[in-house]
Amino acid sequence: MDRGSFLGVLLGFALLAVAIGLGPNPRIFFHPASTVVVVGGVIAATMIRFTLEHVSYAFTIASRAFFTRAPGTQALVSQIVGLSQRARREGLLNMEKAMDVEGFLSKGLRMVVDQASREHIHGVLAAELRATQERHLQGQEIFRFIALSAPSFGMVGTLIGMVQLFASLKDPSSVGGAMALCLLSTLYGAVIAYLLAIPIAGKLELRSKEELQLKHIMMEGILGIQAEMHPMALEAQLNAFLAPKERGQDRRRG
């Protein structure tokens, strides 16, 4: 789990709860009509703008972004160099017995074992990288759309409340409900946009960059193994993807 994200969300809602709790009547902040206008409006607009499958996938990758962490680049480089050493020592065909990898790396290494051409391997892996990036961008776009539409529906709720307010000027007992709809709709829209949707979109962008970097390292490693590069030369090439501090740590361990 990404503890920073969890603590950030927890802190944000805790601050809201404390601010509301310090008031004379916290229950006034729970307004069903405002919830229907803002939350219902955001859901409806999102489903109109995107397909149901895309929305479902966006929330799936959002949960992965918060509850799973990608392996470190340093560990990945070490793993690929170890596979390169095994391939050089035992041959590419025997390397398959030692492959304990999944997904993108496994697909590339199996093409190497099957003696596919360098151009074919590069083309397949590059196409998968582009497809991954497109899927990630779509998930980010959905949450950015939610961030854009939530304050807009908060304004819709405000306008509805203003109409009700002016219509009920002759009935003072109805003024309070109309004012609550005006103000709380704006509050709900702002909370959804700035405490949830925008941070989630930013987190998805960060996770996407991390995953794409890992896959670029995998692709370079796979092509290096296919070209039968010396493991030390391959390690030096892959270390270009690491931060200077990580490279320094790696040298000290060696």
Image: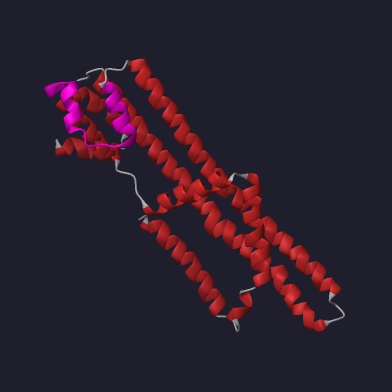
Comparing 27 with 135, the one in front is 135
Relative image position of residue 195 (x, y in whole percent): 53, 59
Q: Residue furthest left?
A: 89
Q: Residue at x 60, y 52 (%)?
A: 146
Foreground: 114 or 225? 114
Residue 109 magenta-drawn? yes
Total tally of numbered discs in the picture: 0
Question: Going by the picture, which residue comes out furthest to the right?
Answer: 170
Q: Main secondary structure of the magenta part?
A: helix
Q: Quick check: is 139 in the magenta stretch?
A: no
User: In screen coordinates, is 205 left or right of 39?
Assistant: left
Q: Along the horizontal axis of the image, is 197 left or right of 207?
A: right
Residue 95 vertical placement versus 115 (above, below): below
- Give the residue at x 41% y 62%: 7
Magenta residues span 88-112
Q: Is residue 79 above or below residue 118?
A: below
* Quarter of the C terminus within the rendering: top left
